[in-house]
Amino acid sequence: MSSAERSEPTVFTRIINGEIPGRFVWADDVCVAFATIEPQTRGHVLVVPREEIESYVDAPEKTVAHLAVVAQRIAATQVRVFDAVRPGIIVVGLDVPHLHVHVLPLHQASDVNPSSAAAAEADDLDAAMTELRAGLVEDGWGANVPAELGSAALA
């Protein structure tokens, strides 16, 4: 089902619009990145286009390229901030019909197993996202870090 056929906005659109709380680390005119409430590792975020695009293969190449660049920038910061061995970049998209790229710091191979995801405490998510936001600023991406943790606003 395409976004035009969907009668209700996706949960990700509702998060982006502020209808459901989110913890944002990145915002630009094409996409946002926010914490997943069931992280596989500390610092796990989702990079999500603002436009409701159902699947990776449905996205315009320009959007896919932009998401890849943002994911790379966030991943580089995650590796440093969370002392990870490597970054993990995963596109699955079975749970929400809105394209999203999982970006997570990896410490071991099993970190990429979705069964390692677990609900996180709000305070733990806030702390991890605050660290990641500070790291993004340190790495020169402050213009893309929203002023408030709970907002996808550009300025």
Image (spheres, grey):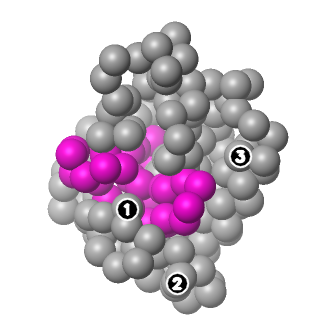
Left or right: 116 with respect to 18? right
- Which residue in the protein does label 1 denote? 152
Residue at position x 22%, y 45% in the image: 20
Which is more toward the observer, 93 or 105?
Answer: 93
Residue 118 spot, x, y in % from top left: 32, 36
The local crowd at label 3, few if under 14, some if 14 to 19, many if 20 or more residues have their Cα within 10 Å, is some
Q: Give residue 28's quadrant in the image.
A: bottom right
Residue 151 spot, x, y in % from top left: 30, 64
* Residues at circles 1 and 3 in contact by the CB criterion of under 8 Å: no
Residue 89 seen = yes
Q: Secondary structure at mark 1?
A: loop
Amino acid tagged 2: Gly
Identify the residue at the far front of this view.
4
- Which residue in the protein does label 2 denote? 142
Left or right: 139 with respect to 144? right
Amino acid tagged 1: Ala
The first of marks 3 and 2 along the sequence is: 3
Residue stretch rendered in magenta on the structure? 15-43
Q: Secondary structure at mark 3?
A: helix
In the image, is residue 61 above or below residue 8?
Answer: below
Q: Give residue 72's quadrant in the image.
A: bottom right
The first of marks 2 and 1 along the sequence is: 2
The local crowd at label 1, few if under 14, some if 14 to 19, many if 20 or more residues have their Cα within 10 Å, is many
Which is more toward the observer, 44 or 141?
Answer: 141
Which is more toward the observer, 12 or 88?
Answer: 12
Residue 63's tag is: 3
